[in-house]
Amino acid sequence: MADIHKPGEDNRPAGTYEEVGPRGGRLHDPRIVHIDRGDRLPPTSESGNRWERQGRRKK
């Protein structure tokens, strides 16, 4: 399962996060943000959406 987080969570690993739907599905025009260590995940464009970390994926 993907590493999905709620908006406002802090102490997430630094990296790039993509906005996904409430159940982890892809959005048509997702927001992509980069946070540094200790930063809080920003609000999403719609209520119920979440953040998924991009990059290091297990194969």
Image (spheres, helix red, strand yellow):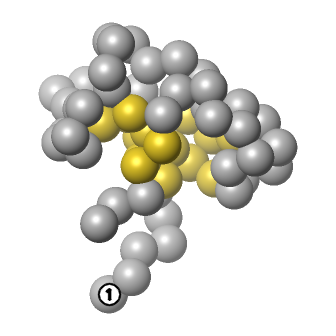
Inspect this view and state whether residue 26 appears.
yes
**Left-right relation of 42 to 28:** right
Quarter that holds the C terminus? bottom left
Residue 3, percent across and down? 43, 58
Q: Residue furthest bottom?
A: 59
Say which residue appears at 62% left-offset and 26% top-offset: 8
Q: Residue furthest top?
A: 46
Report the number of numbered marks.
Answer: 1
Quarter that holds the N terminus? bottom left
Q: Is residue 48 above or below residue 22?
A: above
- At label 1, the amino acid type is Lys
Residue 21, percent across and down? 24, 32
Which of the pair 8/34 is nearer the observer?
A: 8
Q: Is residue 13 above or below residue 25?
A: below
**Left-right relation of 56 to 27:** right
Say which residue appears at 39% left-offset and 82% top-offset: 58
Residue at the spot of label 1? 59
Which of the pair 15/12 is nearer the observer?
A: 12
Quadrant in the picture for residue 23? top left
Q: Is residue 44 above or below residue 52?
A: above
| Label 1 secondary element | loop
Q: Residue furthest right?
A: 38
Inspect this view and state whether residue 36 appears.
no
Say which residue appears at 34% left-offset and 13% top-offset: 47
Residue 10, percent across and down? 71, 38
Residue 24, percent across and down? 24, 44
Label 1 crowd bin: few (<14), some (14–19), many (20+), radius 10 Å: few
Say which residue appears at 30% left-offset and 36% top-offset: 20
Which of the pair 52/47 is nearer the observer?
A: 47
**Left-right relation of 12 to 6:** right
